[in-house]
Amino acid sequence: MAGHVLKCVFFLLSIVSFSQSGLDNFFKPSDTLNIPRRNAVIISEASLATISLIGLDQLWYADFERSKFHTTNDNNEWLQMDKLGHVYASYQMGRVGAEVLHWSGVSQKEQLIYGATLGFGFLTAVEVFDGFSQEWGFSWGDVVANAAGTGLYVGQELLWNEQRVHLKFSFHQTRYAALNPDKLGAGFLEQILKDYNGQTYWLSINVHDFFKKNYIPKWLNIAVGYSADGMLQGVEDVDNILLTNNNRRRQFYLSFDVNLNRIRTKSHFLKSVFSVFNTIKVPFPALEFSKKGSAFHLLYY
């Protein structure tokens, strides 16, 4: 996955010099309120959200039996990896929501009120759908995770007027998916979403922002990661442990990262590209800590 990402970055770098000035001006944030842009953002977001929710209702939830609205407590499942997925999704959707309003020239207050809450609003609506599905149920744990992701973005904007701590994601394929493809995914794209054993969520902390020292590169981040291993389903299955020797465990990582948003460029198009790819942790050497002890990875992703 990391190789494909780097290829895409280099490809975009190679073509950016040929981009017309009109394209770059399009990506340049407006200094004042640009009503056509703002209206386009509102209409686009409302349309995408509506289409997505209708699509989920007709294509996903239709395959499962409906029920009366009910709640469920799934906080002990997947060693909380699914909850971190909610935090990450809410944070990134809120970040994008705020950034496109910034592009439209909307005030910072309105960016935070109407943009940064995009992830929380959409994911909570999906949670309501879960509440009417016999297969799942409305999870207050998921709602709290959604709020945490939104709070991480909004809190930093209010405190520092910038994002000094970014939430990032990395993934590698594992042997567990083949043991339970229904739960963990039958192909690479499914596994990115379903195989929690291969997912790692990172708090990527910009060193320069905290210490303001000239000798510290502005793009250098320290990353603290969390993942889990040995999971074939949500809760621990003693029979599976005995048959497969899979022991569920939490894993913590310490690594370096690159803040792509701090790479200097005058191209607004390239800044937008960097903003998209800044959601992914750049592969670096990493130290792993778990109940099995510590380990060193020459290149972890």
Image: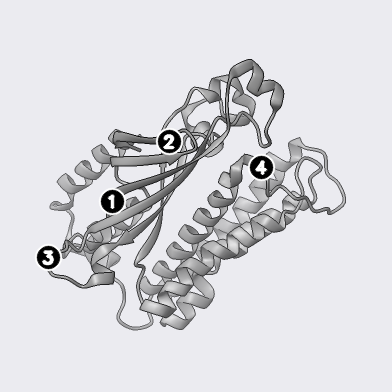
Secondary element at tag 2: strand
In the image, is residue 99 above or below residue 233? below
Circle 2 or circle 1, nearest the eye: 2
Could you tell me if residue 74 is visible in this image? Answer: yes
> Is residue 288 found left or right of 119 in the rendered image?
left
Query: In front here: 242 or 2?
Result: 242
Residue 283: x %, y % from top left: 29, 41
Residue at (73% x, 52% y) in the render = 129
Q: Earlier in the sequence, mark 4 or mark 3?
A: 4
Front-lying residue, 52 or 129: 129
Left-right relation of 212 to 69:
left
- The kind of secondary structure element at disc 3 is loop
Q: Is residue 179 left or right of residue 277?
A: right
Q: CA distance from mark 2 to mark 3?
A: 34 Å
Q: Mark 2 or mark 3, which has the lower sequence index?
A: 3
The reply to whether discs 4 and 1 touch (Cβ–Cβ < 8 Å) is: no
Task: Please identify the quadrant where the N terminus is shown.
Answer: top left
Q: How is the image coloured?
A: one colour
Q: Which residue is mark 2?
A: 293
Lower sequence index among marks 2 and 4: 4
In this rendering, position of residue 125 left or right of residue 224: right
Disc number for residue 77? 4
- Callout 1 amino acid: Asp
| Number of the label disc, if any, that sits on residue 215 | 3
Disc 4/disc 1 C-alpha distance (Å): 29 Å
- Name the N-terminal-most of marks 2 and 1: 1
Q: Which residue does the numbered mark 1 point to in the structure image?
A: 257
Q: Residue at x 59, y 60 (%)?
A: 146
